[in-house]
Image (cartoon, helix red, strand yellow):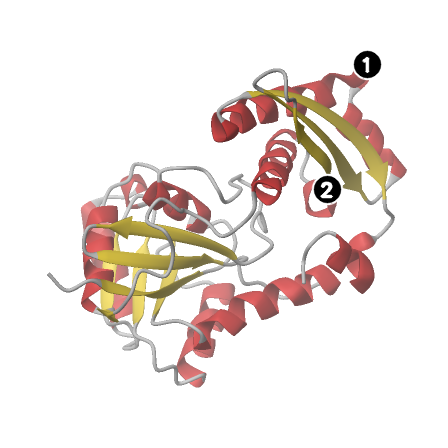
Amino acid sequence: MKFKSGFVTIIGRPNVGKSTLLNAIIGQKISAISNKAQTTRDKITLIHTDEDSQIIFLDTPGIQMPKNKLGDFMLKTSEDTLSEVDVITYIVDCSEKIGKMDSYIINELKEKKLKAPIILLINKVDEIQKEKLFEIIKMYDEIGIFKEIIPISALKRDGIENYIEVLKKYLSEGPMFYPEDMITDKPEKYIVSEIIREKALRFLDEEIPHGIAVSIESMKERTDKNLMDIQANIYVERESHKKIVIGKSGSMLKKIGTNARKEIENLLDMKVNLTLWVKVEKNWRDKENKVKYFGYK
């Protein structure tokens, strides 16, 4: 049996289910998921290995017009991966019309004249009737740039095995780039910070989340017991946001911390003592040095 390997980027506008798809493929939550746009900010490498292939997925930020230095970084991150990979996966939801942002992405894919084949995934098909799905498939097929169009439900894991098998058709014979038990090249610190940020995104109001960053100040395992002490800072852009993140008598911060701690314990397979602090870094998304400080390079 020939072993195949290669790199696959996942692109799409915000909130179409890129991270949900990849976490389902990997079987563990690495990419932050929430119902807020721009949840993924950086390029995250996720590795799927089975008996005859290793597929290295690049989860990228949702493509949208940048409004600040962080937005510039995110757009460049998404677009740069298009020329680096063996297969491009473009994911959309089951909207019956192609919206403004999807039209922009499709035009980008056409104009760049990319060498890599483009596979289209239509996500959230569990939410629509089959008749409408056929119409949506026809609408995208007429664009003429997609090698394959695959309907999936990332949330329910429907169609994912088929997608993996289709990817293998377009990969070449090659080596195993990573150890077979490795699922991401990101360090534990990064994943822990993403878990905390995801909980904050999930529980906070719409006007705050995009201005949230998390830095892990320390992670130390105690030598005398199976316990990890973690100290982290949650950064916001305004003093008024700090009060909201902390909540009445610390209730919101406790809610974020409790939910994050449970997930971090599952990740690390040990008890966790998590301490969170909230700090203000005014308008950090507009400051290039601060965008880099928070790890977006």
Q: Going from the N terminus, do you reach mark 1 or mark 2 first?
A: 2
Q: Which of 69 and 93 is in front in this view?
A: 69
Q: Is residue 122 above or below residue 118?
A: above
| Corner quadrant of residue 194 | top right
The residue depicted at 42 percent of the width and 76 percent of the height is: 109
Task: Specify whether residue 126 is in view.
Answer: yes
Q: Which mark is residue 215?
A: 2
**259 shown above or below 287:** above
* x then y, percent, for residue 232: 73, 34
Question: Which element is circle 2 on?
Answer: strand
The span from disc 1 to disc 2 (Cα, nearest Å) is: 23 Å
Relative to residue 242, is residue 101 drawn left or right?
Answer: left
Label 1 element class:
helix
Establish if 202 lies above or below 24: above
**Kind of residue at badge 2:** Ser
Please tell me whether residue 80 is drawn above or below residue 115 in the rendered image. above
Residue 249, numbered label: 1
Image depth: mark 1 or mark 2 in front: 2
Left or right of 163? Residue 274 is right
> Residue 95: where, in percent of width, then height?
38, 54
The amino acid marked with disc number 1 is: Ser
Judging depth in this view, the residue of 240 and 86 nearest the camera is: 86
